[in-house]
Amino acid sequence: MQRVEPQDFSRVLSSMCTKPHPAAREAAEEFLATNPGDPGTYETVSELEQEAVDMLGTVTGLPNPAGYVTSGGTEANIQAVRIARNRADTDRPNMVAPDSAHFSFNKAADILNVELRTTPTDEDHRADPDAVARAVDEDTAVVVGVAGSTEYGRVDPIPELADIANEVDALCHVDAAWGGFVLPFTDHRWHFGHADVDTMTIDPHKMGQAAIPSGGLVTHSKSLLDELAVETPYLESKSQATLTGTRSGAGVASAVAAMDALWPVGYREQYHESMANAEWLADRLAARGHDVVEPELPIVAADMSMPVTEDLRRRGWRVTKTGAGEMRVVCMPHVTRSMLRSFVAELDWF
Amino acid sequence: MQRVEPQDFSRVLSSMCTKPHPAAREAAEEFLATNPGDPGTYETVSELEQEAVDMLGTVTGLPNPAGYVTSGGTEANIQAVRIARNRADTDRPNMVAPDSAHFSFNKAADILNVELRTTPTDEDHRADPDAVARAVDEDTAVVVGVAGSTEYGRVDPIPELADIANEVDALCHVDAAWGGFVLPFTDHRWHFGHADVDTMTIDPHKMGQAAIPSGGLVTHSKSLLDELAVETPYLESKSQATLTGTRSGAGVASAVAAMDALWPVGYREQYHESMANAEWLADRLAARGHDVVEPELPIVAADMSMPVTEDLRRRGWRVTKTGAGEMRVVCMPHVTRSMLRSFVAELDWF
């Protein structure tokens, strides 16, 4: 199989991460040896983290956000479920999520001892509010909605899901890990300003173009974040709400630098470019007779035979498959039109 | 209060992290945009991770180690407790740890729904095997020993603790997050080769001189790690044992580079230098009439009045306090004799 150099993205169509923006890379290198987990020692990066959270609030429609820069979307999702579990008044907490939810919710279920109830998605791969309403009960700690699903880039009907959560006194968590930095430029109703959302995952190191590790957990109020606090003897700070202890200052600084450079104009341009690329690819694949799941955000899934995707991998292309077996291409910022032209040209050789 | 620049370590005596080794920084920058959490896309860094685990096995006396590079010691400790909890045949699992254990075990208890039973340490701040033996029962999933405690750098009697764990069919976890890269050069009995240890935390980004985030979880067998596996649809790999999803390739590459550069000669030299610095500082503080906790590894704790530590912070020195209120200085690789001379000289001004 053709090897791909560590940071060569020229044939990577499978990743939800991307080449960091130059300003993000520079900031990551400048703050490589800092630890926002120890704010008494590393004050500068700790202040930057508050800036990052404030900017994430701006992106997600929340004026006074609480939260922190996580190691990634998985940590943010686990922590959101943990907030809900700790707050729920039950010994047998459950969470309800559509079956399009990321596998980090399976991790959260195992780690946190919370039952995961998945509900079927509708024919267009979105959460079905009726199915969710049937699945919740008085032990439901959190209802999960996805804004930009991993496999098909679909956006669940968040306001309806938030209403269902409210009815059973559960929290509403939105996983916008990947979609959060493109959704502001669409007509979707997905964020704190659209619905009664309590917590959200939004990752600068995905469509936000920051360096890894830079995820985001945003909570509607400080008191929700306080559900996570444990005491910290020997540090100058008194408590810690994060899942991890030592954390990457590179990720924090890089998130701020990327958002400074790109919000909102750069992200808007990138969204339009990525979306145009996704539509271009979807058209080309459809024209070749493949069943294509119409892109709604910049992800394309198409029914291709197994040998084709295996052959593509041998030629150095990185593509993945959906659970249903479709080939999946994520049109990240590093995925250019000329890359996609080469990709389609190679497909035609088979 | 005097500001400290992002990566200026010239007055930092409080951190358990340090300036990365030049080779470690270089590797981190080279692999900044890679994600070992997606080995199908980022193969090179994924192979490097196996090298890192093998080297951690060498450092900790384990010929065929399983494990992975975590975000830090907290993740590794949580995951070790999770392995033990998932393996334990009880609905009310508990863990037993000395009260010198890091606060990440409090986090693990909350996150994982495992009761934390802490036992008093002896007069020299080490776990007391008799107290541990009294605390365990048939619901004990794991007995925790510390090899290089956060506050005083003490090493628990690991072989005795492992025997106690064995007697109740619990796992034995050793937290050598900080101590793991200096202990090989001492006479302590702390690792897999010395006792029936099941899992260990050892962090390259502490005394290992790698860049953040680079922690380590090492397990005695692959089957222990498999307790953590969840399925991963849409990734080329089939399951994932890590707590986080997307992970830092910078941390992985940096760990390998640091260990390549320093194991064992560089680490041995650093240990002797740091230890000599700790003893020098302890002597100077004792000569000035302070009660000093004799350093056993390169950490010094001394009874100083509150105003002094506050004054030191105002002058830009970063020092922390133990739970008992002593001033605590961690003699990391960036802490030189000349730094300590300046520190003691400023102390004399008060």
Image (tube, coloured by chain):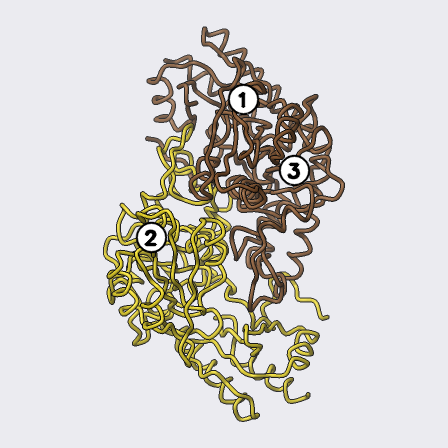
Chain colours: A yellow, B brown
The residue mark sitting in front, 3 or 1, is 1
Residue B218, x across and y down, in percent:
64, 42
Q: Earlier in the sequence, mark 3 or mark 1?
A: 1
Dividing the picture into quadrants, the one containing residue B294 is top right
Q: Find the distance from the CA under tag 2 to the CA under tag 3.
A: 39 Å
**Amino acid type, residue under disc 2 in the picture:** Val
Q: Is residue B292 above or below residue A213?
A: above
Q: Secondary structure at mark 1?
A: helix
Q: Secondary structure at mark 2?
A: helix
Chain identity of mark 1:
B
Residue B20, x across and y down, in percent:
57, 40
Q: Residues within 10 Å of mark 2 (few under 14, many from 20)?
A: many
Dividing the picture into quadrants, the one containing residue B307 is top left
Disc on res. B198: 3
Q: Are marks 2 and 3 on the same chain?
A: no
Q: Is residue B288 above or below residue A344?
A: above
Q: Residues within 10 Å of mark 3 (few under 14, many from 20)?
A: many
Q: Find the distance from the CA under tag 1 to the CA under tag 2.
A: 46 Å
Nearest the camera: A93 or B332?
A93
The residue mark sitting in front, 1 or 2, is 1
Disc on res. B134: 1
**Amino acid type, residue under disc 1 in the picture:** Arg
Chain identity of mark 2:
A
**Amino acid type, residue under disc 3 in the picture:** Asp
